[in-house]
Image (cartoon, rainbow, N blue to C red):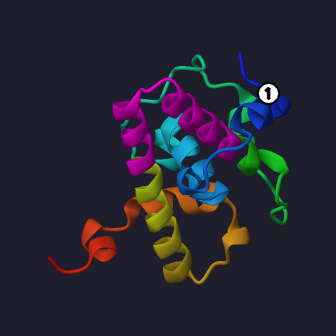
Amino acid sequence: MSPTDEQLRIAARDIEPRDDHNNLSASALVLAMLRPDVFGVAGGPPLRIFGQPAPSGLLDIQRGPYRSGHGADNRRGNLLEALTKHFRQTSQLGTLHLLQDTWTMMSGRCSFALRALGWSAHAGAWRVARHALAVPDSSIRGPQ
């Protein structure tokens, strides 16, 4: 069963600013986790916490210009915000840190991919996700 937009909005309400890494990277990350064969790393197992196949509401592709607070990318952003808030409130700090580190990594990779491709943030997470995961680690971290 897929959560509704309203349920996700309520669950994500009042998230701490330090925990929000933007809807584009959240959406790209959720798409990559739910459909790694299409949006992530080919051959990776899909996240199955919402069932298999994943509910269509979490896989909807947002077309047209991005609108803050609306649409499929926002829905997936609210999902990660709600999970972050839940893990913080229930003191599941190990899981919280893994989620935050992964989201932060995806945010950096999305920014790099957008710049490299000459796209704006309005390109849509569905276009950015696969490119973001294809960026070599050395490009993100710089020389070691």
Q: Would you identify the image quadrant in which residue 25 lies?
A: bottom right
Amino acid at the residue labelled 1: Gln
Q: Which residues fall within the magenta stretch?
A: 76-101
Residue found 44% across the figure and 41% down from its top = 99
**Residue 21, percent from left and from top:** 56, 57
Q: Is residue 113 left or right of residue 31?
A: left
Which residue occupies 52% across, 48% down? 29
Towards the viewer: 96 or 74: 96
Q: Main secondary structure of the magenta part?
A: helix
Is residue 131 or residue 22 the one in the foreground?
A: 22
Question: In this figure, which residue is indicated by the disc labeled 1?
Answer: 7
Does residue 143 appear in this view? yes
Query: Which quadrant would residue 123 be assigned to in this image?
Result: bottom right
- Looking at the picture, tell me which residue is in the foreground, 67 or 43: 67
Q: Is residue 32 above or below residue 130?
A: above
Any magenta on residue 17? no
Drawn side of residue 48 relative to residue 15, left or right:
left
Position of the N terminus, as image quadrant, is top right
Residue 61 can be seen in this image:
no
